[in-house]
Image: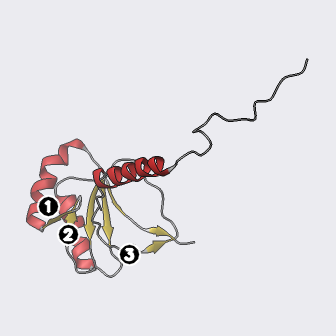
Amino acid sequence: MKFKRHTKLEHGLEQIDIAPLIDVIFQLLVFFMLSSSFTFQSGINVKLPKAVTSDIIKEENLIITITSENIIYLNSNISTLEELKSELEKIKGKNNPILIKADRRSSVGRIVDVWDLCRNLGIERINIATNQDN
């Protein structure tokens, strides 16, 4: 059985105009660029000390961060020792572990102040964040 090939195109379909297609794609691109929101999370720059014997913590922690300028953050919010004490008093019965992320250049006295504050409130599960020494 022999099939005939239709090699002749109808009049008007010899060229496909792609200009409308480019216009539509450009308009979609502009729409998605304008409708998307770019939010940047502000972070606290802390260089953790290295330790050979560190373990990976798999629980949800309340994070207290101490920067190299000895500024205390409680879950990314700046806090004083008094504010930290009032916030920790609210959660002390829940037995949540606390993770202290202290910059390696922060004062040992500030770290001990936070540690003692937690221990005086009866919080026993306190960890200090470190990087593993590779």
Please name the amino acid that badge 3 sits on.
Lys
Which residue is drawn at the image coordinates 14% and 65% (left, top)? 79
Q: Which residue is mark 1?
A: 84
Compute the Cα span from label 2 to label 3: 15 Å
* Earlier residue among tags 3 and 1: 3
Crowding around mark 1 (Cα neighbors within 10 Å: few <14, some 14 to 19, many 20+) is some
Where disc 2 sits, the SS reads: strand
Disc 3 on helix, strand or loop? loop
Calculate the distance from the C-alpha at mark 3 to the C-alpha at mark 1. Answer: 22 Å
Amino acid at the residue labelled 2:
Ile
Relative to the observer, which residue lies in front, 17 or 35? Answer: 17
Q: Which mark is residue 47?
A: 3
Which amino acid does the dot numbered 1 rest on?
Leu
Alpha-carbon distance for marks 1 and 2?
Answer: 9 Å
Q: Earlier in the sequence, mark 2 or mark 3?
A: 3
Chain-order first, disc 1 or disc 2? 2
From the viewer's perspective, tell me whether residue 38 is left or right of residue 56: left
Q: Residues within 10 Å of mark 2 (few under 14, many from 20)?
A: many
Q: Is residue 125 above or below residue 72?
A: above
User: In the rendered view, would you say 41 is above or below 60?
Assistant: below
Residue 19 in percent (x, y) is at 47, 51
Residue at left 18%, top 48%? Answer: 92
Residue name at image x 31 percent, y 52 percent: 36
Q: Where 105 sits versus 30, above or below? A: below
Quarter that holds the N terminus: top right
Disc 3 versus disc 1: nearer the observer? 3
Residue at the disc numbered 2 = 72
In the picture provided, is 5 more to the left or to the right than 63? right
Q: Are marks 1 and 2 in contact (CB under 8 Å)?
A: yes
